[in-house]
Every structure is written in C-alpha cells, then in structure tokens.
Amino acid sequence: MSQITLNPNPTFKEVVKITVPGGGEGELTFEFKHYPLSKLAEMGKQDGMTNDRFIMFIANGWGFKEHEFNQENLDTLLDNYPQAYEAIITTYYQSLGLFREKN
C-alpha cells in the first residue's frame, strides 16, 4: 500500500490504453504532473484551453523512445488515434481518484 503524504509526488507514471485502428488496444506510458484539484479547475476556465494544450500542461513525457514529447508529436498522436485524448485524460483523472473504473 502506498504511503499518503500531505504533498504528493510532483510527477507519476501511468499506462494509457489507446484504441488502435483495426481493433485492440495499444499501451503508452505517460509521465504526468500532479496538480491539486483547485489548479485543474482553474485551468479548465482558461480561454483557449484546447485538448492538446491541456495534455501538454498535465504531461511531462511519454514512453516513445524514438519520438520526443513535444507539441508536434502530440498533435500527430491525436490525429492518428482519435480516441487518444479521451484515454489520456481519463487515465490522468482516474489516477487522481476523480474517476472510478467500471467493474
């Protein structure tokens, strides 16, 4: 069991399951930044907060060794895998305990 601290680790890793065209799922590890709920709510109110901009804000890196985590490569991922945004955000919020997984 994990130890609870008043201030959680600033980053954490989670495996994101992304639907692959033709069926099935692929896995990609993301390193996320921990933000308090108040900061996430504040971000959501910002004008011009797009899907890709939000991911760039909450993520610190990913498991692609051959592709740097940057805006251009993230845009390519989201363009090629339309369900990726939902998968990334859902995984992030689940890891914060805001969403529960279905049984």
Image: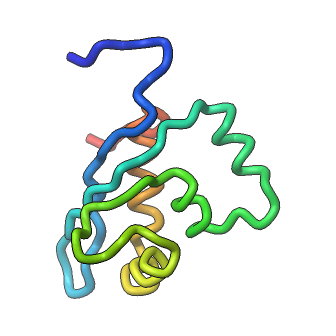
* Residue 41 at x, y percent in the picture: 70, 41
Q: Which quadrant holds residue 100? A: top left
Q: Is residue 37 left or right of residue 33?
A: right
Residue at the (56%, 69%) spot, across then down: 52
Q: Considering the image in quadrants, where does the C terminus appear? A: top left
Compared with 4, 92 (above or below) is: below
Residue shown at 43%/53% (left/top)?
60
Which quarter of the image is occupied by the N terminus?
A: top left
In the displayed structure, would residue 18 be above or below residue 43? below
Q: Coloured how?
A: rainbow
Q: Nearer the viewer, residue 75 or 24?
A: 75
Percent position of residue 23, x then y? 20, 80
Q: Residue at x 36, y 72 (%)?
A: 68
How far across and down, in percent of the image, does residue 86 sit?
A: 46, 63
Furthest residue in direction right, as rendered: 47
From the viewer's perspective, is residue 88 above or below residue 11? below
Seen in the image, is 44 located left or right of residue 92?
A: right
- Tally of marks: 0
The percent coordinates of residue 62 (x first, y second) are: 32, 61
Judging depth in this view, the residue of 43 and 73 nearest the camera is 73
Residue at the spot 20% in from the left edge and 69% down from the top edge: 26
